[in-house]
Amino acid sequence: MDIETFLREHRMERDLADVQMLRGLPRELAAKIAHACVWRVYPAGTVILAQDDPTRDVMFVRHGRVRILQFTPSGREIGFAEVLSGGHFGEIAAIDGGSRSATAVAVEDTVTANLAGSEFLALLGSTPALTLNVMRAMARIIRLTNLRVNELRGLTAPGRVIHELLLLAQKAGQGADRRLVRLEPAPTQSEIASLAGTTRETVARTLSDLEHRGLVRRGGRSLELLRLEGLEDLLEESIQSK
């Protein structure tokens, strides 16, 4: 589907009013930036940009969801973050002139507004509010990366799987009695493996063990976390036993 048809069917305008990076900027400047962007639609599963690409565009997500990931030399996929509508990615290559540091994949049909790296740098030089927003975004990336490194060092592979399940529970909203959280649609084993920095086989074994312990229940398209405190206890054991 072409971009004009997608925007029309979803009743979307070519505006960036909800983009976090542009908050605090005059409305006229945000509109000017939106006009300068190249707008594209990426079907679910499409690689938007690949690790080591030489491109420099900064991409604002107007609709959809994008997963940021890297691949190890052996080909293992490691997920770092997901960018939702209102978020952005690609600014690192625009700032330092290097190749792309990660791969970005459309998790669902996604619309981006792509701003040329040269125009992005010019805006940084002339717009202090934008520069501050970018610095804050970069600080968040550094904090999240530090957390991820500590997780990978301090937990066993099954522990990392449990940790990701607890993070998903936190995003979904914990039950009032801290017993039941239902994830629907459930993340795939490959998606959990990517986030946990392990293999799909390890995720399958861990889920089977958790199901045997009565801590999770798997359905067709759902995954129920039955006792959050039990998962947290296993997480503690994983840290201590490593």
Image (spheres, rainbow, N blue to C red):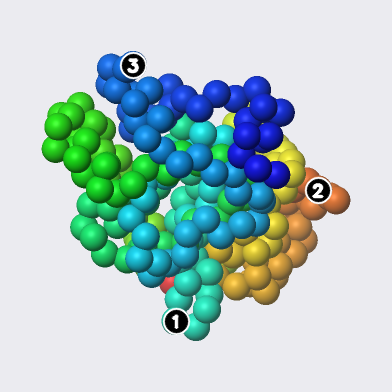
Amino acid type shown at disc 3: Arg
The residues bearing labels 2 and 1 have C-alpha atoms spaced at a distance of: 32 Å
Q: Residue at x 77, y 61 (%)?
A: 212
- Please state the horizontal and vertical placement of residue 127, each as a whole percent of the image: 18, 29
Mark 1 or 3, closer to the camera: 3
Q: Is residue 58 above or below residue 239?
A: above
In front: mark 2 or mark 3? 3
Q: Name the amino acid type tagged 1.
A: Pro
Q: Residue at x 56, y 40 (%)?
A: 111
Spatial CA distance of label 1 from label 3 is: 45 Å
Q: Is residue 199 above or below residue 187?
A: below
Q: Is residue 209 left or right of residue 130?
A: right
Element class at badge 3: helix
Q: Circle 2 sits on which residue? A: 221
Quadrant holding the C terminus = bottom left
Name the foreground residue: 16 vs 175.
16
Q: Is residue 198 visible?
A: yes
**What residue is drawn where x is 66% and y is 51%?**
44
Q: CA distance from mark 2 to mark 3?
A: 42 Å
Q: Counting other residues with Cα less than 10 Å from the Cα at mark 1, is it few (<14), some (14-19), or many (20 or more)?
A: few
Answer with mark 1 or mark 3, whichever residue precedes in sequence: 3
Q: Position of residue 226 (x, y in %)?
A: 71, 43
Q: Secondary structure at mark 2?
A: loop
Residue bearing mark 3: 27
Front-lying residue, 201 or 112: 112
Q: Which residue is mark 1?
A: 73
